[in-house]
Image: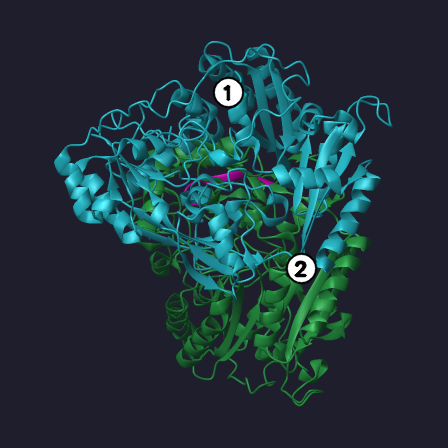
Chain colours: A cyan, B green
């Protein structure tokens, strides 16, 4: 995909009628053309170093071309896109290498260690928290290799009895699903970045998908890992769960390329669902809807998909608040909030779950809205990043951030983050939804839209900091599924403590003594 | 409980009629009297050191009395009991201290670090893999403190909205459940050691209970931890799940006292079930029953309790094989295997789950046996350790061990371990059950009974080693829920690799630089 935009250009949308003026969100349209033509900084690596890589991987798999390096520069956060649009390609890697398998990765790590070059694993390039911005200078390294895992796209093993599949890390979401679908199986991991993000990235960042209520977070799907580190190979996971000391799988999951390069991921798979039903439910308020979600989760009665938009997001997403009751709706209590409830599985399982969930939601005061809102959500579930591009084109600063807390902290967290964003960005519209639900808590996913002004990046960074500080002050997690990267690193110690940070540093030193792996990312 | 036996002496059972001669298990009765009167080795700690402890914790909470030290010597594995019976109390701690809370634990750790004394956290004393056998000499330490957590028995917080409870570590299973029951809640963790084992021990060893199919492993119940380490406090868990780097909770869960002392554990709690129904199902073979379990788990259709005994264990446990069909039963295909299926929850949830599970098991060839076998299992679910004492009294060597693997490896693992035990212990009877089930695999829990002979310990240790080697050769986990301790430590590196072992050592060094915490346990 282009460096300054999301996804397939053919799929790009203009700004839908009504979005900008729906709630007075009329900003001056600003001309911010894509800057694909800006030159990438020259490679810092000496020719003989690059020649050494070519010997290891072959000519075709070592690329210093500007266009290729541009496309491996940073990720897809709004700051990433704004910097690209402004012509800032300062974080470009010096060379892009394409290993063909685990052994190639091991060879690159040995080369990098010997030559003191940073290695940044690159999957789909969809990082949104600065996870692809290694800092070689701070680590005393001479340059950066982007380790593009795009050639490692195999389904290495399928264990139909155990219901597990072993993938290489470079497979994108749809590619992995297509390989499984040939066997009547699926993974069921559908984050918004699904179309581009990769299996390795899902594991390295503890990704969570839109069907997490039914299929679980990605880390919960993983049963085994193979990781290449500078000090040797790690293979973990000979059983679903055990008491063989600390579960070290959980130490490499979420390690964001800083502890090693994940070269194989074994996950639980499932039969393809025979039935998929998505429907809408209306709640009088965000609090009432969230409490209904809590009660479903605590009764172990979760459907496959469960999401709830707050009043603002409900209004914006539908672009017609009347559709779910509207202001002064049937109950006269405001515009209401849309919940999407999805069921997938066998006809019998879907019918049983739907009956139980419907009874529970009805008893809790929800109003069923039929399949229309569910179908609308399912149709557009991966489209938000395209809309962001159109908004940016039109001078609107738009970005998302997310967090997670225990249920008793939900309202406090919501209010603190929303207030922090509104205060930091005058005129901003702040939307929120509950995107993932657990028995003991839930995530909150915020979308912010505000006038971009002359320097939207300068406007956004203090707002992001204010939101992060509000999350810390609320005693919540700095990220539910976007990972730490460099953007959240300043807030990690508040969450895991000084001893926790020291543990991360100790593990880093043990597995990466020269500090070549994604330096500057994750570890405080 | 007594040092040489399990539990409450008033609850002790004789050897039930029929157990010994049911399948020819007639061994010479050997007189191995309890040896409560053997002297405990003198404390190695100088008086002034002990005086320092008394200043910290008060006279009453620093105990050097022989009887108290004897009861903190080792755990309750058969080798532990045999050593005690033989008068070997060589691993006795030098002093037993009883902290009243987190701050007391911190003070003891500082004292121990300054004076180079090992600290062994002690909960219920039910360890069965040598987790309470610290080796101070190897660590260059002058003695051993048993850190008895029995005074730390509080329910520190109850968050009814989030459905979480925060416990101190010294609470025994029934005590924790009683505190929750006052609020209509429960934890639902029922390992065989339930009556004596503690919350802190459950966390430190990644315990798993008999209702794990419905309520999950203990580590899956934990949402937050407070840990005292020699380098400072660790507080982890501000949300159910997140992407804030590696999940460090999973590094302290299962750390067996080697990374710190767990002083608070926050767990998910649930409403007390209104209905409990346990029933028996008969399967023609262990393989057929296990495959039915697999299919339930992969269909996300697990009841609350799900266990399956192999042919031998079915026969022994019922002491009347005819009860579930017997040899030459209705289908003429052998004695059959008993599955216990339990449902707990609201009447509606139990009815719905039971209907779905019953349909699935029936379709898979199971034969319902009604509530009799279920009630028999529920009645005796915590009694096996008492029976072990009676068998040991009668010259029968009896011990258990367990492992876990993916489903496709189940039969291979079962055959290898069973064969290894039968070859190492001529005349042994080897029983097995599937005790815990996951979508991708299951645990196997073996019980071995054999003639004890003159030196049952010398007979057992090579058999245990053979079983461990068979587990490693099968590519399974060395333990599903008994932990590593010292007994499984020689096999851990095979499972987590050299780099995994190095990671454990690096974390150990970071959080316990002087190596005072449970030295010799867990870490290869």
- Residues B14 and B264: in front is B264
Task: Give the crowd class for mark 1: few <14, some 14-19, many >=20 residues within 10 Å.
Answer: some
Q: Is residue A127 magenta?
A: no
Residue A225: where, in percent of width, then height? Answer: 40, 52
Task: Give the crowd class for mark 2: few <14, some 14-19, many >=20 residues within 10 Å.
Answer: many
Q: Chain of mark 2?
A: B
Residue B454: where, in percent of width, then height? Answer: 42, 79
Instruction: Identify the residue at image location x=48%, y=79%.
Output: B450
Residue A393, which numbered label? 1
Q: Chain of mark 1?
A: A
In the image: residue A259, left or right of residue B156: left
In the image: residue B509, left or right of residue A82: left
Q: Secondary structure at mark 2?
A: loop
Instruction: Work out which residue is located at the far left of the displayed protein and give it.
Output: A48
Instruction: Identify the residue at image location x=59%, y=26%.
Output: A446
Q: Secondary structure at mark 1?
A: helix
Instruction: Identify the residue at image location x=58%, y=79%.
Output: B312
Q: Which stretch appears magenta?
A: B256-266
Q: How many marks?
A: 2
In terms of image quadrants, where is residue B110? top left
In terms of image quadrants, where is residue A308? top right
Q: Mark 2 near mark 1, Cβ–Cβ under 8 Å?
A: no
Residue A95: where, in percent of width, then height? Answer: 25, 35
- Residues A4 and B24: in front is A4
Which residue is label 2 attached to?
B301
Instruction: Identify the residue at image location x=76%, y=46%.
Output: A357
Residue A310: where, in percent of width, then height? Answer: 69, 27
- Residues A505 and A268: in front is A268
Quarter in which the N terminus of chain B is drawn: bottom right
Q: Is residue B57 visible?
A: no
- Check chain identity for marks 2 and 1: say if they share one: no
Residue A511, which numbered label? none
């Amino acid at each position: 995909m282009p460096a300054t935009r999301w996804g397939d250009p053919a799929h790009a949308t203009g700004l839908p009628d009504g979005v900008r003026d729906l709630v007075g969100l009329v900003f001056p349209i600003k001309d911010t053309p894509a800057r694909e033509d800006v030159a990438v900084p020259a490679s810092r690596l000496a020719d003989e170093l690059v020649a050494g890589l070519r010997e290891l991987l072959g000519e075709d798999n070592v690329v210093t071309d500007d266009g290729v390096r541009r496309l491996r520069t940073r990720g897809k956060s709004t700051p990433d896109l704004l910097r690209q649009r402004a012509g800032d390609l300062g974080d470009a890697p010096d060379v892009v290498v394409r290993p063909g398998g685990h052994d190639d990765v091991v060879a690159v790590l040995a080369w990098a260690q010997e030559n003191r070059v940073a290695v940044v694993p690159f999957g789909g390039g969809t990082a949104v928290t600065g996870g692809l911005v290694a800092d070689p200078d701070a680590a005393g390294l001479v340059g950066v290799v982007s380790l593009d895992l795009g050639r490692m796209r195999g389904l290495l093993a399928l264990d139909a009895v155990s219901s597990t599949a072993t993938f290489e890390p470079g497979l994108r979401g749809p590619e992995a699903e297509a390989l499984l679908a040939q066997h009547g199986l699926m993974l069921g991991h559908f984050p918004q970045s699904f179309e581009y993000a990769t299996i390795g990235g899902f594991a390295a960042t503890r990704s969570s998908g839109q069907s997490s209520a039914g299929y679980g977070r990605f880390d919960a799907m993983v049963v085994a890992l193979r990781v290449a580190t500078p000090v040797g190979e790690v293979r973990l996971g000979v059983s679903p769960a055990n008491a063989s000391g600390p579960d070290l799988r959980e130490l490499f999951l979420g390690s964001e390329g800083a502890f090693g390069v994940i070269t194989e991921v074994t996950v639980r798979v499932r039969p393809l669902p025979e039935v998929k039903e998505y429907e809408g439910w209306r709640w009088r308020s965000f609090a009432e809807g969230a409490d209904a979600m809590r009660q479903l989760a605590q009764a172990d009665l979760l459907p496959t998909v469960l999401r709830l938009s707050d009043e603002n997001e409900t209004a914006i997403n539908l672009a017609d608040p009347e559709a779910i009751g509207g202001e002064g709706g049937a109950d006269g209590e405001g515009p209401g909030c849309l919940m999407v409830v999805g069921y997938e599985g066998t006809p019998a399982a879907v019918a049983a779950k739907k009956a139980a969930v419907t009874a529970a939601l009805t008893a809790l005061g929800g109003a069923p809205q039929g399949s229309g809102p569910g179908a609308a959500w399912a149709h557009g579930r991966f489209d938000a990043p395209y809309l962001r591009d159109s908004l940016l084109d039109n001078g609107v600063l738009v970005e998302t951030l997310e967090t997670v807390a225990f249920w008793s902290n939900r309202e406090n967290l919501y209010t603190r983050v929303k207030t922090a964003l509104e205060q930091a960005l005058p005129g901003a519209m702040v939307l929120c939804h509950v995107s993932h639900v657990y028995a003991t808590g839930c995530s909150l996913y915020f979308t912010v839209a505000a006038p971009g002004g002359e320097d939207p990046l300068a406007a956004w960074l203090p707002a992001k900091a204010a939101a992060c500080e509000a999350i810390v002050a609320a005693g919540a997690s700095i990220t539910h599924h976007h990972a730490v990267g460099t953007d959240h690193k300043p807030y990690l110690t508040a969450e895991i403590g000084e001893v926790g940070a020291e543990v991360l540093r100790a593990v880093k030193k043990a597995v990466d003594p020269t500090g070549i792996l994604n330096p500057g990312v994750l570890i405080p």
